Image (cartoon, rainbow, N blue to C red):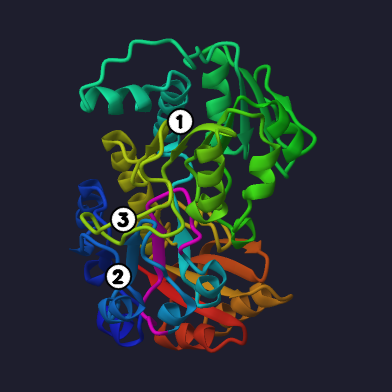
Protein backbone atom coordinates (compact mmCIF):
# COMPACT_ATOMS: atom_id res chain seq x y z
CA UNK A 1 0.00 0.00 0.00
CA UNK A 2 0.98 3.65 -0.40
CA UNK A 3 2.58 5.60 2.42
CA UNK A 4 3.16 9.36 2.71
CA UNK A 5 6.91 8.81 2.86
CA UNK A 6 6.86 6.77 -0.36
CA UNK A 7 4.75 9.43 -2.11
CA UNK A 8 7.27 12.12 -1.19
CA UNK A 9 10.24 10.00 -2.34
CA UNK A 10 8.44 9.28 -5.60
CA UNK A 11 7.75 12.98 -6.18
CA UNK A 12 4.05 13.08 -5.24
CA UNK A 13 3.65 16.13 -2.97
CA UNK A 14 1.17 15.72 -0.12
CA UNK A 15 -1.04 18.74 0.76
CA UNK A 16 0.79 19.47 4.02
CA UNK A 17 4.09 19.72 2.14
CA UNK A 18 3.05 21.81 -0.88
CA UNK A 19 4.78 25.18 -1.33
CA UNK A 20 3.47 28.23 -3.18
CA UNK A 21 5.46 31.21 -4.44
CA UNK A 22 3.39 34.38 -4.92
CA UNK A 23 4.87 37.40 -6.73
CA UNK A 24 3.84 40.97 -7.59
CA UNK A 25 1.83 41.92 -4.50
CA UNK A 26 -1.06 39.50 -4.84
CA UNK A 27 -4.04 40.14 -2.59
CA UNK A 28 -3.68 38.68 0.96
CA UNK A 29 -6.81 36.60 0.36
CA UNK A 30 -4.72 34.33 -1.89
CA UNK A 31 -2.30 33.63 0.95
CA UNK A 32 -5.17 33.07 3.37
CA UNK A 33 -6.80 30.61 0.98
CA UNK A 34 -3.62 28.60 0.53
CA UNK A 35 -2.65 28.54 4.20
CA UNK A 36 -6.15 27.40 5.20
CA UNK A 37 -5.55 24.38 2.93
CA UNK A 38 -2.20 23.60 4.54
CA UNK A 39 -0.08 25.07 1.73
CA UNK A 40 3.08 26.95 2.75
CA UNK A 41 3.28 30.39 1.10
CA UNK A 42 6.21 32.65 0.27
CA UNK A 43 5.38 36.18 -0.92
CA UNK A 44 7.54 38.60 -2.94
CA UNK A 45 6.44 42.14 -3.78
CA UNK A 46 8.03 42.51 -7.22
CA UNK A 47 8.43 40.57 -10.43
CA UNK A 48 11.38 38.25 -11.13
CA UNK A 49 13.49 37.72 -14.22
CA UNK A 50 14.26 34.23 -15.56
CA UNK A 51 17.33 33.51 -13.43
CA UNK A 52 15.70 34.79 -10.24
CA UNK A 53 12.57 32.77 -10.92
CA UNK A 54 14.45 29.54 -11.65
CA UNK A 55 16.24 29.84 -8.31
CA UNK A 56 13.07 30.77 -6.40
CA UNK A 57 11.04 27.87 -7.86
CA UNK A 58 13.27 25.12 -6.50
CA UNK A 59 10.98 22.79 -4.56
CA UNK A 60 7.90 24.93 -5.30
CA UNK A 61 4.68 23.36 -6.62
CA UNK A 62 2.49 26.47 -7.15
CA UNK A 63 3.41 29.81 -8.75
CA UNK A 64 1.21 32.91 -8.61
CA UNK A 65 2.02 35.94 -10.79
CA UNK A 66 0.43 38.98 -12.34
CA UNK A 67 1.54 40.52 -15.64
CA UNK A 68 5.24 41.34 -15.20
CA UNK A 69 6.80 37.95 -14.41
CA UNK A 70 7.39 35.79 -17.49
CA UNK A 71 7.04 32.03 -17.10
CA UNK A 72 9.10 31.06 -20.14
CA UNK A 73 9.95 27.64 -21.54
CA UNK A 74 13.44 27.96 -20.03
CA UNK A 75 11.99 28.53 -16.55
CA UNK A 76 9.50 25.68 -17.01
CA UNK A 77 12.21 23.23 -18.09
CA UNK A 78 14.29 24.18 -15.03
CA UNK A 79 11.39 23.78 -12.54
CA UNK A 80 10.46 20.07 -12.33
CA UNK A 81 8.53 20.44 -9.06
CA UNK A 82 6.11 23.03 -10.49
CA UNK A 83 2.64 21.57 -11.07
CA UNK A 84 0.40 24.66 -11.38
CA UNK A 85 0.62 28.37 -12.21
CA UNK A 86 -1.95 31.07 -11.67
CA UNK A 87 -2.12 34.34 -13.60
CA UNK A 88 -3.87 36.68 -11.16
CA UNK A 89 -5.14 38.69 -14.11
CA UNK A 90 -7.23 38.27 -17.25
CA UNK A 91 -4.32 37.81 -19.63
CA UNK A 92 -2.04 34.77 -19.82
CA UNK A 93 0.45 35.93 -22.46
CA UNK A 94 3.11 36.08 -19.72
CA UNK A 95 2.97 32.26 -19.53
CA UNK A 96 4.22 29.88 -22.21
CA UNK A 97 1.04 27.83 -22.08
CA UNK A 98 2.16 25.18 -24.57
CA UNK A 99 5.44 24.53 -22.77
CA UNK A 100 3.57 24.37 -19.46
CA UNK A 101 1.07 21.85 -20.86
CA UNK A 102 3.87 19.66 -22.23
CA UNK A 103 5.31 19.46 -18.71
CA UNK A 104 1.94 18.81 -17.10
CA UNK A 105 1.70 22.24 -15.47
CA UNK A 106 -1.91 23.42 -15.29
CA UNK A 107 -2.45 27.16 -15.80
CA UNK A 108 -5.36 29.21 -14.50
CA UNK A 109 -6.40 32.86 -14.77
CA UNK A 110 -9.20 35.22 -13.73
CA UNK A 111 -11.25 35.84 -16.88
CA UNK A 112 -14.08 37.76 -15.19
CA UNK A 113 -13.05 39.06 -11.76
CA UNK A 114 -11.77 42.51 -12.74
CA UNK A 115 -14.06 43.09 -15.73
CA UNK A 116 -16.23 45.64 -13.95
CA UNK A 117 -13.22 47.61 -12.71
CA UNK A 118 -11.83 47.98 -16.24
CA UNK A 119 -15.24 48.96 -17.61
CA UNK A 120 -15.75 51.65 -14.96
CA UNK A 121 -12.30 53.11 -15.65
CA UNK A 122 -12.96 53.18 -19.40
CA UNK A 123 -16.24 55.03 -18.83
CA UNK A 124 -14.62 57.56 -16.51
CA UNK A 125 -11.86 58.21 -19.05
CA UNK A 126 -14.29 58.60 -21.94
CA UNK A 127 -16.17 61.26 -19.98
CA UNK A 128 -12.95 62.98 -18.88
CA UNK A 129 -11.55 63.17 -22.41
CA UNK A 130 -14.81 64.31 -23.96
CA UNK A 131 -15.12 67.09 -21.35
CA UNK A 132 -11.36 67.87 -21.70
CA UNK A 133 -10.86 67.47 -17.95
CA UNK A 134 -7.10 66.68 -18.20
CA UNK A 135 -6.57 70.07 -19.89
CA UNK A 136 -8.63 71.95 -17.29
CA UNK A 137 -6.90 70.17 -14.42
CA UNK A 138 -3.42 71.04 -15.70
CA UNK A 139 -4.33 74.71 -16.16
CA UNK A 140 -5.87 74.94 -12.70
CA UNK A 141 -2.74 73.47 -11.10
CA UNK A 142 -0.77 76.11 -12.98
CA UNK A 143 -3.04 78.82 -11.57
CA UNK A 144 -4.87 79.50 -14.81
CA UNK A 145 -8.66 79.99 -14.72
CA UNK A 146 -10.12 79.14 -18.14
CA UNK A 147 -13.87 78.65 -17.84
CA UNK A 148 -14.82 77.65 -21.38
CA UNK A 149 -17.07 75.13 -23.13
CA UNK A 150 -14.90 75.05 -26.24
CA UNK A 151 -14.31 71.45 -27.31
CA UNK A 152 -16.27 69.98 -24.37
CA UNK A 153 -19.10 67.57 -25.13
CA UNK A 154 -21.48 65.13 -23.49
CA UNK A 155 -20.92 61.46 -24.28
CA UNK A 156 -24.66 61.00 -24.71
CA UNK A 157 -25.39 60.58 -28.41
CA UNK A 158 -21.76 60.00 -29.34
CA UNK A 159 -20.61 56.79 -31.03
CA UNK A 160 -18.37 54.40 -29.13
CA UNK A 161 -16.33 51.95 -31.19
CA UNK A 162 -15.27 48.88 -29.21
CA UNK A 163 -12.46 46.82 -30.72
CA UNK A 164 -12.61 43.37 -29.11
CA UNK A 165 -16.03 42.24 -27.87
CA UNK A 166 -15.03 39.79 -25.14
CA UNK A 167 -15.87 39.91 -21.43
CA UNK A 168 -14.79 43.53 -21.00
CA UNK A 169 -15.84 44.88 -24.39
CA UNK A 170 -19.33 43.42 -24.18
CA UNK A 171 -19.96 44.68 -20.63
CA UNK A 172 -18.68 48.13 -21.62
CA UNK A 173 -21.16 47.99 -24.49
CA UNK A 174 -24.08 47.60 -22.09
CA UNK A 175 -22.92 50.36 -19.73
CA UNK A 176 -22.19 52.79 -22.57
CA UNK A 177 -25.61 52.22 -24.10
CA UNK A 178 -27.21 52.93 -20.71
CA UNK A 179 -25.40 56.28 -20.78
CA UNK A 180 -27.03 57.12 -24.09
CA UNK A 181 -24.16 56.28 -26.42
CA UNK A 182 -24.44 54.60 -29.80
CA UNK A 183 -22.30 51.45 -29.67
CA UNK A 184 -20.56 49.76 -32.56
CA UNK A 185 -18.02 46.96 -32.24
CA UNK A 186 -15.59 44.85 -34.22
CA UNK A 187 -14.24 41.41 -33.34
CA UNK A 188 -12.56 38.87 -35.60
CA UNK A 189 -14.63 36.12 -33.93
CA UNK A 190 -18.39 35.79 -34.22
CA UNK A 191 -19.95 37.55 -31.20
CA UNK A 192 -23.54 38.14 -30.14
CA UNK A 193 -24.37 41.85 -30.06
CA UNK A 194 -25.83 42.95 -26.74
CA UNK A 195 -28.61 45.51 -26.53
CA UNK A 196 -28.64 47.77 -29.58
CA UNK A 197 -24.93 47.45 -30.33
CA UNK A 198 -24.05 47.04 -34.01
CA UNK A 199 -21.38 44.70 -35.29
CA UNK A 200 -19.18 46.36 -37.94
CA UNK A 201 -17.95 44.39 -40.98
CA UNK A 202 -14.35 45.60 -40.62
CA UNK A 203 -12.04 47.52 -38.31
CA UNK A 204 -11.79 50.37 -40.83
CA UNK A 205 -15.57 50.68 -40.96
CA UNK A 206 -15.64 51.08 -37.17
CA UNK A 207 -12.79 53.61 -37.14
CA UNK A 208 -14.50 55.82 -39.71
CA UNK A 209 -17.69 56.10 -37.60
CA UNK A 210 -16.54 56.14 -33.97
CA UNK A 211 -16.16 59.32 -31.91
CA UNK A 212 -14.31 57.24 -29.32
CA UNK A 213 -12.27 54.11 -30.07
CA UNK A 214 -11.41 51.76 -27.21
CA UNK A 215 -9.26 48.63 -27.49
CA UNK A 216 -10.06 45.45 -25.57
CA UNK A 217 -8.14 42.75 -27.44
CA UNK A 218 -6.19 39.88 -25.91
CA UNK A 219 -2.45 39.45 -25.52
CA UNK A 220 -1.75 36.82 -28.16
CA UNK A 221 1.53 37.44 -29.99
CA UNK A 222 -0.30 37.93 -33.30
CA UNK A 223 -1.76 41.18 -31.94
CA UNK A 224 1.65 42.85 -31.60
CA UNK A 225 1.62 46.14 -33.50
CA UNK A 226 -2.07 45.67 -34.24
CA UNK A 227 -2.88 49.39 -34.09
CA UNK A 228 -0.53 51.87 -35.76
CA UNK A 229 -0.27 54.77 -38.21
CA UNK A 230 -2.55 53.14 -40.77
CA UNK A 231 -5.35 52.71 -38.22
CA UNK A 232 -4.94 56.16 -36.66
CA UNK A 233 -5.14 57.67 -40.16
CA UNK A 234 -8.54 56.05 -40.74
CA UNK A 235 -10.04 57.35 -37.48
CA UNK A 236 -12.50 60.23 -37.58
CA UNK A 237 -10.69 63.57 -37.16
CA UNK A 238 -10.67 64.61 -33.50
CA UNK A 239 -11.85 61.23 -32.19
CA UNK A 240 -10.60 60.00 -28.83
CA UNK A 241 -8.57 56.83 -28.30
CA UNK A 242 -8.35 54.44 -25.31
CA UNK A 243 -6.08 51.45 -24.70
CA UNK A 244 -6.70 49.45 -21.54
CA UNK A 245 -5.76 46.06 -23.01
CA UNK A 246 -2.09 45.39 -23.92
CA UNK A 247 0.78 47.81 -24.41
CA UNK A 248 2.48 46.08 -27.30
CA UNK A 249 -0.55 46.27 -29.60
CA UNK A 250 -0.28 50.06 -30.13
CA UNK A 251 2.41 52.12 -31.86
CA UNK A 252 2.75 54.87 -29.25
CA UNK A 253 4.93 57.02 -31.53
CA UNK A 254 2.16 57.04 -34.12
CA UNK A 255 -0.34 57.91 -31.40
CA UNK A 256 1.82 60.83 -30.28
CA UNK A 257 1.97 62.14 -33.85
CA UNK A 258 -1.81 61.96 -34.13
CA UNK A 259 -2.26 63.80 -30.83
CA UNK A 260 0.22 66.53 -31.69
CA UNK A 261 -1.35 67.12 -35.11
CA UNK A 262 -4.87 67.26 -33.64
CA UNK A 263 -6.05 64.31 -35.71
CA UNK A 264 -6.60 62.48 -32.41
CA UNK A 265 -8.51 64.66 -29.97
CA UNK A 266 -7.38 62.92 -26.79
CA UNK A 267 -6.17 59.60 -25.45
CA UNK A 268 -6.24 57.48 -22.31
CA UNK A 269 -3.53 54.81 -22.05
CA UNK A 270 -3.16 52.36 -19.17
CA UNK A 271 -0.73 49.86 -20.73
CA UNK A 272 2.61 50.38 -22.44
CA UNK A 273 5.09 48.45 -24.61
CA UNK A 274 7.66 48.61 -21.79
CA UNK A 275 6.58 48.86 -18.16
CA UNK A 276 8.63 49.03 -14.95
CA UNK A 277 8.94 45.80 -12.98
CA UNK A 278 8.04 47.27 -9.63
CA UNK A 279 6.51 50.25 -7.88
CA UNK A 280 8.76 53.30 -7.80
CA UNK A 281 10.85 52.43 -10.86
CA UNK A 282 11.26 55.28 -13.39
CA UNK A 283 8.89 55.39 -16.35
CA UNK A 284 9.19 57.18 -19.69
CA UNK A 285 6.81 57.22 -22.66
CA UNK A 286 6.47 59.41 -25.79
CA UNK A 287 2.93 60.19 -24.61
CA UNK A 288 3.98 62.29 -21.62
CA UNK A 289 3.25 66.05 -21.46
CA UNK A 290 0.64 66.14 -24.22
CA UNK A 291 -2.66 67.99 -23.64
CA UNK A 292 -5.84 65.94 -23.12
CA UNK A 293 -3.96 62.71 -22.46
CA UNK A 294 -4.58 60.47 -19.43
CA UNK A 295 -1.72 58.13 -18.48
CA UNK A 296 -2.18 55.52 -15.77
CA UNK A 297 0.22 52.79 -14.51
CA UNK A 298 -1.62 49.62 -15.65
CA UNK A 299 -4.33 49.97 -13.03
CA UNK A 300 -7.42 49.24 -15.13
CA UNK A 301 -8.26 46.18 -13.06
CA UNK A 302 -6.59 47.38 -9.87
CA UNK A 303 -9.42 48.13 -7.51
CA UNK A 304 -9.50 46.62 -4.05
CA UNK A 305 -12.70 44.78 -4.97
CA UNK A 306 -11.23 43.32 -8.15
CA UNK A 307 -7.92 42.30 -6.59
CA UNK A 308 -9.72 40.63 -3.70
CA UNK A 309 -11.98 38.70 -6.06
CA UNK A 310 -9.03 37.70 -8.26
CA UNK A 311 -7.04 36.57 -5.22
CA UNK A 312 -9.86 34.32 -4.08
CA UNK A 313 -10.80 33.04 -7.54
CA UNK A 314 -7.36 32.03 -8.82
CA UNK A 315 -6.08 30.65 -5.52
CA UNK A 316 -9.23 28.51 -5.27
CA UNK A 317 -8.62 27.07 -8.76
CA UNK A 318 -4.99 26.30 -7.83
CA UNK A 319 -5.93 24.82 -4.46
CA UNK A 320 -8.58 22.59 -6.01
CA UNK A 321 -6.15 21.36 -8.65
CA UNK A 322 -3.54 20.44 -6.06
CA UNK A 323 -6.00 18.90 -3.62
CA UNK A 324 -8.65 17.33 -5.89
CA UNK A 325 -7.14 17.28 -9.37
CA UNK A 326 -9.90 19.61 -10.62
CA UNK A 327 -8.86 21.44 -13.81
CA UNK A 328 -12.10 23.41 -14.22
CA UNK A 329 -11.38 26.67 -16.13
CA UNK A 330 -7.75 25.80 -16.80
CA UNK A 331 -6.53 27.56 -19.94
CA UNK A 332 -4.07 24.89 -21.14
CA UNK A 333 -5.06 21.38 -19.99
CA UNK A 334 -8.28 19.32 -20.34
CA UNK A 335 -11.05 20.55 -18.06
CA UNK A 336 -12.57 18.30 -15.41
CA UNK A 337 -14.65 19.66 -12.54
CA UNK A 338 -14.15 17.24 -9.66
CA UNK A 339 -15.58 16.92 -6.18
CA UNK A 340 -13.72 15.49 -3.21
CA UNK A 341 -12.30 12.00 -3.85
CA UNK A 342 -14.85 9.30 -3.16
CA UNK A 343 -12.26 6.57 -2.60
CA UNK A 344 -9.10 6.17 -0.57
CA UNK A 345 -6.84 7.61 -3.27
CA UNK A 346 -7.23 9.67 -6.43
CA UNK A 347 -4.90 9.12 -9.39
CA UNK A 348 -4.59 12.07 -11.80
CA UNK A 349 -2.96 11.02 -15.06
CA UNK A 350 -2.14 13.69 -17.65
CA UNK A 351 -1.08 12.06 -20.91
CA UNK A 352 -0.64 12.46 -24.64
CA UNK A 353 -3.99 12.32 -26.39
CA UNK A 354 -3.60 9.07 -28.32
CA UNK A 355 -6.03 6.13 -28.71
CA UNK A 356 -6.03 3.42 -26.07
CA UNK A 357 -4.74 5.30 -23.04
CA UNK A 358 -7.84 4.76 -20.92
CA UNK A 359 -7.82 1.04 -21.72
CA UNK A 360 -4.12 0.88 -20.81
CA UNK A 361 -4.72 2.67 -17.50
CA UNK A 362 -7.51 0.30 -16.56
CA UNK A 363 -5.41 -2.67 -17.62
CA UNK A 364 -2.77 -1.62 -15.10
CA UNK A 365 -5.40 -1.36 -12.36
CA UNK A 366 -6.84 -4.78 -13.25
CA UNK A 367 -3.41 -6.39 -13.43
CA UNK A 368 -2.59 -5.14 -9.93
CA UNK A 369 -6.06 -6.01 -8.58
CA UNK A 370 -6.93 -2.36 -7.84
CA UNK A 371 -10.63 -1.64 -7.22
CA UNK A 372 -11.90 1.44 -9.11
CA UNK A 373 -14.55 3.54 -7.37
CA UNK A 374 -15.03 6.19 -10.09
CA UNK A 375 -13.35 7.57 -13.20
CA UNK A 376 -13.52 10.61 -15.50
CA UNK A 377 -11.74 11.46 -18.76
CA UNK A 378 -11.36 14.67 -20.76
CA UNK A 379 -9.22 15.65 -23.74
CA UNK A 380 -7.96 18.95 -25.11
CA UNK A 381 -5.81 19.15 -28.20
CA UNK A 382 -2.72 17.01 -27.71
CA UNK A 383 -3.50 16.20 -24.07
CA UNK A 384 -5.78 13.81 -22.26
CA UNK A 385 -6.58 13.75 -18.55
CA UNK A 386 -8.00 10.76 -16.73
CA UNK A 387 -8.80 10.88 -13.02
CA UNK A 388 -9.51 7.66 -11.15
CA UNK A 389 -10.78 7.22 -7.59
CA UNK A 390 -9.51 4.05 -5.95
CA UNK A 391 -11.59 2.35 -3.28
CA UNK A 392 -8.96 -0.18 -2.23
CA UNK A 393 -5.86 -2.06 -3.26
CA UNK A 394 -3.64 0.72 -4.65
CA UNK A 395 0.01 -0.29 -4.38
CA UNK A 396 3.34 1.35 -5.08
CA UNK A 397 3.83 -1.11 -7.94
CA UNK A 398 0.59 -0.05 -9.60
CA UNK A 399 1.51 3.62 -9.39
CA UNK A 400 4.99 2.92 -10.77
CA UNK A 401 3.43 1.02 -13.69
CA UNK A 402 1.12 3.96 -14.49
CA UNK A 403 4.03 6.38 -14.38
CA UNK A 404 6.00 4.19 -16.78
CA UNK A 405 3.21 4.07 -19.38
CA UNK A 406 4.18 5.49 -22.79
CA UNK A 407 2.76 8.98 -23.28
CA UNK A 408 2.53 9.84 -19.59
CA UNK A 409 3.06 13.60 -19.12
CA UNK A 410 2.49 13.81 -15.36
CA UNK A 411 1.12 11.42 -12.79
CA UNK A 412 -0.16 12.66 -9.43
CA UNK A 413 -1.35 10.66 -6.43
CA UNK A 414 -3.87 12.52 -4.29
CA UNK A 415 -4.88 11.20 -0.88
| Label 3 – label 2 distance at C-alpha | 18 Å
Q: In this rendering, does residue 301 appear at all?
A: no
Residue on which disc 3 sits: 283
9 within the magenta span? no
Residue on which disc 2 sits: 48
91 within the magenta span? yes
Q: Main secondary structure of the magenta part?
A: loop
Q: Residue furthest right?
A: 201
Q: SS of the residue at dot 1? A: helix
Question: Would you place residue 66 above or below residue 202 in this image?
Answer: below
Q: Residues within 10 Å of mark 2 (few under 14, many from 20)?
A: many
| Label 2 – label 1 distance at C-alpha | 30 Å
Q: In this rendering, does residue 263 appear at all?
A: yes
Tell which circle, 3 or 1, labels the residue nearer the N-terminal end: 1
Q: Which residues are magenta?
A: 78-94
Residue on which disc 1 sits: 122
Q: Nearer the viewer, residue 398 or 262?
A: 262
Q: SS of the residue at dot 2? A: loop
261 left or right, relative to 138? right
| Image position, residue 283 (x, y; %) | 31, 55
Tell which circle, 3 or 2, labels the residue nearer the N-terminal end: 2
Amino acid sequence: MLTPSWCERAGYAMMGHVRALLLENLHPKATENFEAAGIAVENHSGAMDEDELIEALKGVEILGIRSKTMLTERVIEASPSLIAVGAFSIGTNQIDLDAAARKGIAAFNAPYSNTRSVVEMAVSEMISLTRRLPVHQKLMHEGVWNKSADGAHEIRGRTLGIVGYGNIGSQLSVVAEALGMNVIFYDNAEKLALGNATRMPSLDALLREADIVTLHVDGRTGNKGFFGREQFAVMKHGAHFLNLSRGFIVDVDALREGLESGAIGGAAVDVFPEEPKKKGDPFVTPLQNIPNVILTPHVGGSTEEAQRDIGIFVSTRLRDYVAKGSTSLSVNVPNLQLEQPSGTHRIAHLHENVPGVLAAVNHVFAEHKVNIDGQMLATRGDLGYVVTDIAAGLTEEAVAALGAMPGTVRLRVLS
